[in-house]
């Protein structure tokens, strides 16, 4: 299996040495992993109220450290990054990324305007807003991220359900059907993120209905644990493998130098 979403302490909300994450990946029998820590938002002119990314001066260390580990780790190690999408920041984002040697770039949405809708400290904001409007605003940002041309993968595509807030099934279905079409049109890779089982969402990101809509449209998928501690590497991959088998997903996408290839995992009926 592959785990393409591993963080490091540089983001200020993860713990453990990078070597410890790789040791856990080896213990779990993973064949390939990728570090994808949070890109320094200050380089985009964004300064979060609570530090949740590396600092600009730490980016070169991060790149060099991952590259160094890739030469001596017992598993294949890729250099990724997780980068927030912000409206109006596409040009500056493309500029700061130019020349950086990432194997893949994971796009994500944490902010709806100035509100970090994924941070526990701000979760009460859900009770002050129309949930349907929150979902509409959130998925509009996901669509724009897909269409921006900045990213290879979109992370935890429905993380807006993180704290257990869900819209009615028919409303969710409309969002899911539309965003699956966007993924198809933009040839975007969908991340299967297992961190949802460790919070009130209590399920995979994405929801199975959304995953099925994407599979029907031929959208490629990859896997990530969103590990913020070494013992979270590959978390719940046993559950994920069962879903892959049940849904007939036989391959995950791998990346190198921002070019994709297919990695066989399982097929329906095996």
Image (spheres, rainbow, N blue to C red):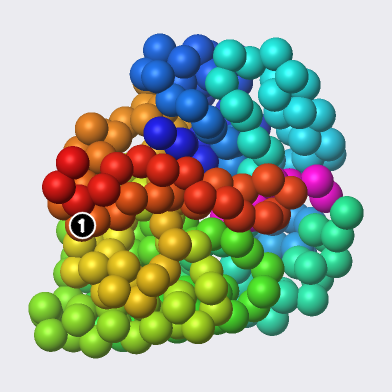
User: Could you tell me which residue is drawn at 37 percent across and 18 percent down?
Assistant: 28
Residue 82 location (% of width, % of height): 59, 51
Residue 35: x and y in percent read 59, 35
Residues 178 and 132: in front is: 178
The furthest residue to the right: 99
Tell me which residue sits at (64%, 77%) in the image.
148
Residue 5 placement (x, y as % from top left): 50, 41
| Quarter of the view holding residue 131 | bottom left
Q: Is residue 110 left or right of residue 54?
A: left
Q: Nearer the viewer, residue 46 or 206?
A: 206
Residue 98 is at least partly visible in this image: yes
According to the picture, the residue beneath numbered tag 1 turns out to be: 247
Q: Observer-nearest residue: 213 or 120? A: 213
The answer to whether residue 165 is left or right of residue 195 is left
Q: Quick check: is 105 in the magenta stretch? A: yes
Q: Which residue does the image show at 63% across and 16% down from the upper left? A: 73
38 displayed left or right of 179: right
Residue 257: horizontal and vertical position, in percent? 74, 49
Residue at the image position 83 percent from the left and 36 percent from the top: 60
Q: Residues within 10 Å of mark 1 (few under 14, many from 20)?
A: some
The quadrant in which the C terminus is found is: top left
Can you say whether 46 is above or below 25 in the image?
A: below
Task: Verify whether residue 210 appears in magenta.
Answer: no
Residue reaching furthest to the left: 169
Assign the N terminus to one quadrant of the image: top left
Mark 1: secondary structure:
loop
* Residues rendered magenta in the picture: 100-106
């Amino acid at each position: 299996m592959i785990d393409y979403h591993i963080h490091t302490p540089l983001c200020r909300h993860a713990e453990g040495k990078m070597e410890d994450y790789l040791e856990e990946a080896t213990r779990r029998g993973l064949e390939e992993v990728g570090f994808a820590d949070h890109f320094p938002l200050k380089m985009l002119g964004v300064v979060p109220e609570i530090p949740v990314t590396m600092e600009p001066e730490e980016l070169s260390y991060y790149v060099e450290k991952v590259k160094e580990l890739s030469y001596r780790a017992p598993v294949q190690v890729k250099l990724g990054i997780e980068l927030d999408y912000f409206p109006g920041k596409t040009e500056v984002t493309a500029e700061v990324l130019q020349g950086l040697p990432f194997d893949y770039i994971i796009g994500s949405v944490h902010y709806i305007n100035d509100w970090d809708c994924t941070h526990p400290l701000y979760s009460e904001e859900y009770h002050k807003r129309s949930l349907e409007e929150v979902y509409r605003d959130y998925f509009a940002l996901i669509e724009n991220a897909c269409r921006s041309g900045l990213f290879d993968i979109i992370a935890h595509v429905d993380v807006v359900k993180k704290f257990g807030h869900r819209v009615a099934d028919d409303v969710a279905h409309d969002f899911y059907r539309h965003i699956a079409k966007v993924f198809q049109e933009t040839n975007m890779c969908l991340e299967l993120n297992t961190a949802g089982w460790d919070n009130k969402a209590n399920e995979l990101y994405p929801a199975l209905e959304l995953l099925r809509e994407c599979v029907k449209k031929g959208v490629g998928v990859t896997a990530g644990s969103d590990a913020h501690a070494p013992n979270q590497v590959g978390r719940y991959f046993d559950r994920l493998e069962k879903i892959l088998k049940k849904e007939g997903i036989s391959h995950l996408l791998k990346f190198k130098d921002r070019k994709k290839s297919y990695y066989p995992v399982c097929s329906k009926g095996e």
